[in-house]
Amino acid sequence: MLILCNWKLNGKKNILKKFFVELNNLCIKFKIKSNISISPPIIYLSKLYEILKDIKSKIILTSQNVDVHIQGAFTGETSVYMLKEFNVKYVIVGHSERRIHHFESDEIVSSKFDIVKKNGLIPILCIGEHFQESFDKSKIFIKNQIDSIFIKIGKKAFRNSIIAYEPVWAIGSGISADPNYVNDIHFLIKSYICKKDNFFKNNNIVVQYGGSISKNNVYNFISKKYIDGILIGGASLEIKTLFPIIKIIEKFSK
Ligand code: 13P
């Protein structure tokens, strides 16, 4: 199972080595087989690349963002080429925090998704509604977010990509979504994409859940048929909150 950790705008240069060495040692000690990926602020990727190389760790690096351009006069941005130099495997695109605070439209998100794929990295497309009212309303909202990717890239868009379903109201609120509801939404996402692209057999596109995951609720999610893995925010910032989650996932992995 894939365990994605999004540090958002958190972390400090002088905690990186201790955190990664400790996490790596625990993974070895407990023979963890799940794939663990950490997404630190971009400025820390180069240091983490060196640390992971030194300790020969299997922990994977994810980027929280990427620019829609490869290079040029785009002050403050990071190119997918640069991410590749530091062995980054996944790139988060369309996180609700970027859609809300940085005004990223579906058009920008699909351009980022496209550039990540074209350059051989794996996009993690975050989707999710910001209201809590109804399944039917959410269904339309989510299908529209998926359609914007299909419109830009075509029907093969989701091959070699990951989707993270994160209902916006569940992010950082301490109130996770109902696992049965999430399972139904994941089924909807999978069947919608499979219907458009028959490359996917048996709904085998990876869909992760994110939103207030903790050691107390993670089993309720990963035990569901259509929830393939998780995307952890706040609880991934400290080993003492992250590693218990990893252990639960490891014990009950499908
Ligand atoms: P929290 O786990 O803090 O709710 O964050 C989820 C998230 O947004 C991960 O991308």
Image (cartoon, rainbow, N blue to C red):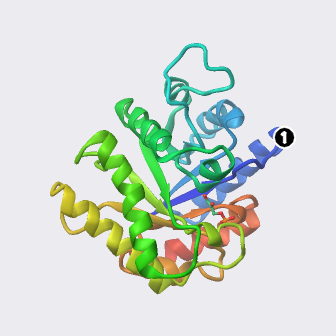
Q: In which quarter of the image is the N terminus?
A: bottom left
Instruction: Let me know if residue 180 appears in the view.
Output: yes
Locate ligand 1 by image quadrant.
Answer: bottom right
Residue 237, quarter of the rendered image: bottom right
For the point 38% across and 37% down, which residue is it?
A: 114
Q: Which residue lies furthest to the top in this view?
A: 72
Q: In which quarter of the image is the C terminus?
A: bottom left
Residue 134 placement, left or right of 43: left
Above or below, 231 relative to 252: above
Q: Residue furthest left?
A: 198
Above or below, 108 relative to 4: above
Instruction: Let me know if residue 33 appears in the view.
Output: no
Pinpoint residue 122: horizontal percent, then vertical percent. 41, 43
How many callouts does the rendering have?
1
Pinpoint residue 123: horizontal percent, then vertical percent. 44, 45
Residue designated by label 1: 14
Near-viewer residue (97 or 233) = 97
Near-viewer residue (2 or 108) = 108
For the point 47% across and 37% down, which residue is it?
A: 112
Element type at marker 1?
helix
Residue 68 placement, left or right of 187: right
Q: What residue type is labelled 1?
A: Asn
Pinpoint residue 158: horizontal percent, then vertical percent. 31, 50
Above or below, 9 relative to 187: above
For the point 52% across and 45% down, which residue is it?
A: 105
